[in-house]
């Protein structure tokens, strides 16, 4: 009982910290659209910054990165294979998107693991098989710090693993929910990560955030996705 009480107190303290950080970040604005608040506004198509360059390892074992996604519309999320809370819902939602947009050649799905030490390419491959993931749905692993900094600085999503407190800070993230997404880690710790699905356009610009655990939010994602797919590809500059 003492151990359980300690964990509950830790979760409550972490939640209060996250809410405070989120409030500070909101006060500083979000992206290039001026002041934004967590919620529906982030589901409206806008310009919320660009995804920075990255190179990680796909479940197939090949190295892939941002350059391989240029010219494509894609939806990204952060999960891990031993998560029993939001991750199964996130992956089911992406599996549905995969089926609905199967005939759309310029659309990709990208799932980043937040537990890369455990989630090797082989582990991710077995996880992907549960959801009948095809070649247009990537599952990426790699260096822990690189992934965490990509989540925090690149996608502006919160992620934290108390089992790895020595990870260097990567700047301030805007936590897009007053209720954090908690998941049960394989080592019996707690990994906190966002359950948001991020829509990215052909130029690597983040265009919207949607909550995978909210049916209405995912319906709005589908509408936004169709709009992005209908946008004309950017033209190459004249030489």
Image (spheres, rainbow, N blue to C red):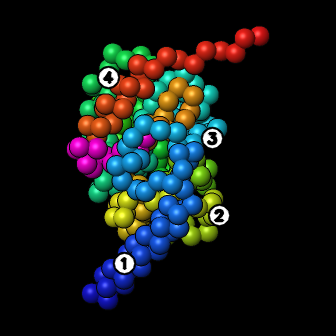
Name the residue tied to disc 2.
Answer: 168
Q: How crowded is mark 3: few (under 14 residues within 10 Å), some or many (20 or more)?
A: few
Name the residue tied to disc 4.
Answer: 101
Where is residue 66, by image quadrant?
A: top right
* Secondary element at image label 4: loop
Q: Quadrant of the C terminus?
A: top right
Distance from disc 2 to disc 1, alpha carbons, whole Å, reads: 23 Å
Cβ atoms under marks 3 and 1 closer than 8 Å: no
Name the residue tied to disc 1.
Answer: 12
Cβ atoms under marks 2 and 1 closer than 8 Å: no
The residue under the point 35% across, 25% down is 226
Q: Is residue 215 magenta?
A: yes
Query: Depth check: 227 or 187 in front?
Result: 227
For marks 3 and 2, the one nearer the N-term is 3
Above or below, 124 relative to 151:
above
Q: Position of residue 39 (x, y in %)?
A: 36, 53
Cβ atoms under marks 3 and 2 closer than 8 Å: no
Viewer-nearest of labels 2 and 4?
A: 4
Residue range corresponding to the magenta coloring: 208-217
For marks 2 and 4, the one nearer the N-term is 4
Report whether residue 221 is seen.
yes
Q: How many labels does the image show?
A: 4
Distance from disc 2 to disc 4, alpha carbons, whole Å, reads: 38 Å
* Secondary element at image label 2: loop
Q: Does the magenta stretch include residue 225?
A: no
The residue under the point 45% across, 31% down is 74
């Amino acid at each position: 009982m003492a151990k359980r009480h300690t964990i509950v107190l830790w979760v409550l303290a972490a939640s209060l910290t996250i809410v405070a950080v989120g409030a500070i970040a909101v006060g500083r604005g979000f992206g290039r659209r001026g002041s934004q608040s967590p919620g529906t506004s982030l589901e409206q198509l806008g310009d919320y910054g660009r995804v920075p360059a990255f190179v990680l390892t796909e479940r197939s074992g090949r190295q892939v990165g941002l350059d391989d996604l240029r010219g494509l519309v894609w939806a990204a999320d952060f999960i891990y294979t031993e998560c029993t809370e939001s991750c199964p819902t996130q992956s089911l939602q992406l599996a549905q998107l995969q089926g609905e947009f199967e005939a759309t050649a310029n659309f990709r799905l990208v799932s980043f693991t937040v537990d890369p030490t455990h989630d090797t390419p082989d582990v991710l491959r077995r996880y992907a098989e549960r959801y009948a993931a095809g070649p247009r749905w990537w599952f990426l692993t790699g260096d822990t710090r690189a992934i965490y900094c990509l989540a925090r600085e690149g996608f502006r999503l919160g992620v934290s693993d108390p089992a790895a407190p020595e990870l260097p800070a990567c700047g301030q993230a805007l936590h897009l929910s007053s209720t954090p997404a908690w998941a049960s880690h394989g080592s019996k710790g707690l990994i906190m990560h966002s359950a948001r699905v991020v829509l990215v356009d052909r130029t690597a610009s983040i265009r919207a955030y949607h909550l995978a655990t909210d049916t209405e939010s995912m319906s709005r994602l589908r509408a936004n996705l169709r709009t992005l797919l209908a946008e004309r590809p950017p033209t190459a500059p004249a030489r």
